[in-house]
Image: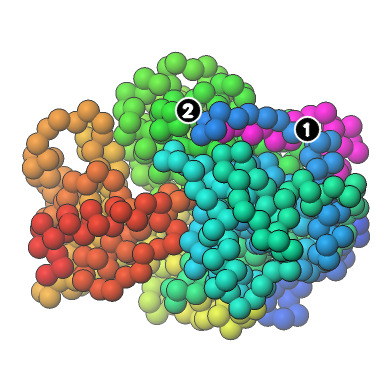
Amino acid sequence: MDYKSIYSSWKSDPERFWMEAAKAIDWVKFPSHALNESRKPFYQWFSDGEVNTCYNAVDRHVEAGLGTKDAIIYDSPVTGGKSKLTFKELLEQTSKFASALHRSGVQKGDRVIIYMPMIPEAIVSMLACARLGAIHSVVFGGFAAKELAVRIEDAKPRAIVSGSCGIEPSGVVPYKPLLDKAIELSNHKPEFCVVYQRKQLEAQLVLGRDFEWNDFQKRSSEHPCHPVLGSDPLYILYTSGTTGQPKGVIRPTGGHLVSLMWTMRNFYGVDPGDVFWAASDVGWVVGHSYIVYAPLFAGNTTVLFEGKPVGTPDPGTFWRVVQEHKIKTLFTAPTAFRAIKRSDPNGDYIKKFDISSLRALFLAGERADPDTIKWASEKLKVPVIDHWWQTETGFPMVGYPLGFKSPEVKIGSAGLPMPGFQIEVLGDDGESLGADMLGSIAVKLPLPPGTLPTLWNADERFKSAYLSRFPGYYETGDAGTIDPEGYVSIMARTDDVINTAGHRLSTGAMEEVLTEHPDIAECAVIGVKDELKGQIPIGFICLNAGVNREPSGIMEEVVQSIREKIGPVASFKIAIVVDRLPKTRSGKILRGTMLKIANGDEFKTPATIDDATILIEIEQALEKVGYPQ
């Protein structure tokens, strides 16, 4: 079948479409219906079905005779460690840890915070919670104590599972002092903590509260899967909120299973047995969906990579992993490829490895600029697929599905809407805009299975954050356009659409022009306050390795390019060369923080920032060009 047929089959009968998709899951009790609209706008899917996530990820494959097949490949260039876990071994470890948690009082509906590095025990912990029907909340390892405390306070976990430390290219990051401080700051105290001691740094345990990973499980053997309702939460994943209070996105069990299972074959084009690598972190939604759950649901081997695209040890580390583990599908952030391209613009490291197993590269997490897509396509000689989704949705909203006859790829567009998502571009008045007009991207309700039904203990905040501005729609917070053929282009966050002398302009469109310059590796454009024009754009650019030209010449060229391709109305006159851009640990550029620095507004250093010292460098660079004014 082709894309149009699949999308039309969903649109004409959503209930039938999702009930058919649900047959790919092993249910304890198959649901009698797909959508439950009894509590609008808090829609539920498969609410009377009974199911267990861990069973679908692990047990059913062992029972089908696939126990000796590799479930997880662990590859850690930062420690030099490598290992594999078969489905049978993963079942044994998960069942044993679930038994230990249960013996210590963790039951269905209890919360467990997981604060772990990228090690197999993180996946075991997540699956063990799912096995019990407990709700896990993974917090990115090394998150600041204050931010971790906020999550402890909100989720009120019965237990916390942590590693003693994480390993970064810069060195060892102790986790336990951060955990201890977070517990001290939080009014809620966990009943106990389980700590996996890494040989790089062993942590001091608090007597009576903390238990070492192996000691904790000494008297445990195995534990069965506990069925839960399809509408019961599998996990809470906190995402940043505009008020400073993180939003606890809930992932419902049944819809999560059905939607992720559907995407592996239909969207990513992955067959059972293939090796799938999502180069992300288990602390982010990509890690939840496509390192841990979706590949295991589909019987794939998933790669757990503890490293960076460059510096561990060089820009060839991705290609070494592809060659060594025969990766079929790679999914990573555009930021990772911009880093590789910047360090290895000619692709010399790619030539050193046999990457013939690779059939597709998927990019998501931040806008994939056309220059990066073209570079990757040329060097890898495989389809490079941009796609778009969010923490709140849990799986792709827009893209180019490889599992059936895919539509033509348009570089610069994230693709076409996936089944379940009826996407429109709305103006400030809530009316649909015409083709190619820039506006707010919104999705008609109800959202499909697996998407957030609400926020943890915050129904009213869910409505105000996502549903209030455009009644009947989910507001994505992204701005973009839809062309006459239905292709969706995500240009920026709505906060990054700037108004210059009455003209609405996309900073993403300007970034697209900048990255076309052969000397520029990556960039960010922000719209700063201007008394005359309202806002004017300022560009920050990072140059490719080996560029020895005077920056002033590059600046003149990019200013002229913006003038030619977007127009004088953009008022683009300032571009600043910087060594690096401030980013979150997942690779998103902190444009909002940069904007606050440029405008002279107070700002809080984000807990998610990869390296806070870069903010000082940005501040100094802005001062040189007269900002804040």
Q: Could you tell me residue 556's position as x and y percent? A: 9, 44
Q: Nearer the viewer, residue 83 or 66?
A: 83
SS at mark 1 in the image: strand
Mark number for residue 296? none
The residue beneath circle 2 is: 317
Residue at position x 65%, y 45% from top? 197
First in sequence, mark 2 or 1: give its number. Answer: 1
Q: Could you classify mark 1 by the number of other residues whose Cα lies within 10 Å: few (under 14), some (14-19), or many (20 or more)?
A: some
The residue beneath circle 1 is: 86
Q: Which of 189 and 77 is in front in this view?
A: 189
The relative height of residue 15 versus residue 199 in the rendered view (above or below) is below
Task: Please say if the residues under marks 2 and 1 sit with CB atoms less than 8 Å apart.
Answer: no
Q: In which quarter of the image is residue 459?
A: bottom right
Q: Could you tell me residue 141's position as x and y percent? A: 55, 53
Residue at position x 22%, y 47% from top? 578
Residue at position x 85%, y 47% from top? 218
Image quarter (top left, top right, bottom left or bottom right) of the N terminus: top right
In the displayed structure image, the side of residue 625 where residue 413 appears, left or right: right
The relative height of residue 338 versus residue 178 in the rendered view (above or below) is above
Q: Which amino acid lies under the numbered mark 2 shown in the image of this protein?
A: Thr
In the displayed structure image, the side of residue 621 where residue 106 appears, left or right: right
The way the protein has been coloured in the rendering is: rainbow
In the displayed structure image, the side of residue 263 where residue 370 appears, left or right: left
Image quarter (top left, top right, bottom left or bottom right) of the C terminus: bottom left
Which residues fall within the magenta stretch?
57-76
Q: Could you tell me residue 203's position as x and y percent? A: 60, 50
Residue 335: tell me if it is visible.
Answer: yes
Residue at position x 90%, y 47% from top? 221
The relative height of residue 473 versus residue 264 in the rendered view (above or below) is below
Residue 455: tell me if it is visible.
Answer: no
